[in-house]
Amino acid sequence: MTSAKTVLIIEDDASLRYALANKCKSAGLNVLEATEGESGLQRALLEHPDLILLDLLLPQRDGMSVVTDLRKDPWGKTAKVIILSNMSETEKVAEALEHRVFEYRVKSDVAIDSVLESIRSHLGIEVAKK
């Protein structure tokens, strides 16, 4: 039996972080959490989660600098990252894609179930048929 995949949620909005974490846990995923950029980056580099959900507007260190430094690390070069942000400016999306993020999702346009579908897809997790 394979061990459960791990998702790191780097999000300062407590209610969204809680909702995402609960949805992931109910889907059988292990969840790590960070509330600001610097601790999120350190946690990612230490624990090597299977996927990172990353907000861009974070205390101490913004998400774009987190992904920039993540890509400098041998493990982080290929880490799976999904950006969840309220910022929908074309320049931010383009910058994120230059850093090889898997997806850029605007929070106001996405349901948590849709985020979970993306996580499952990127991690190769099939949904059990009922």
Image (cartoon, grey):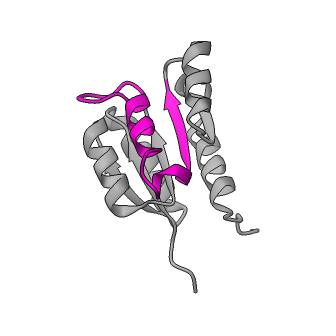
Dividing the picture into quarters, in which one does residue 55 lie? top left
64 part of magenta stretch: yes
Which residue is at 60% across, 30% downward? 98
Q: Nearer the viewer, residue 21 or 124?
A: 124
Which residue is at 62% across, 22% downward? 94
Magenta region: which residues? 56-85
Give the quadrant of the N terminus: bottom right
51 to 40, vertically: above or below: below
Q: Is residue 64 found left or right of 27 in the rendered image?
A: left
Give the quadrant of the C terminus: bottom right
Residue 126, given in percent of the width and then of the height, sits at: 71, 65
Q: Is residue 10 found left or right of 29 in the rendered image?
A: left
Q: Nearer the viewer, residue 100 or 88?
A: 100
Residue 53, given in percent of the width and then of the height, sits at: 48, 43
11 part of magenta stretch: no
- Residue situated furthest bottom in the rendering: 1
Residue 99, given in percent of the width and then of the height, sits at: 55, 35
Q: Nearer the viewer, residue 43 or 29?
A: 43
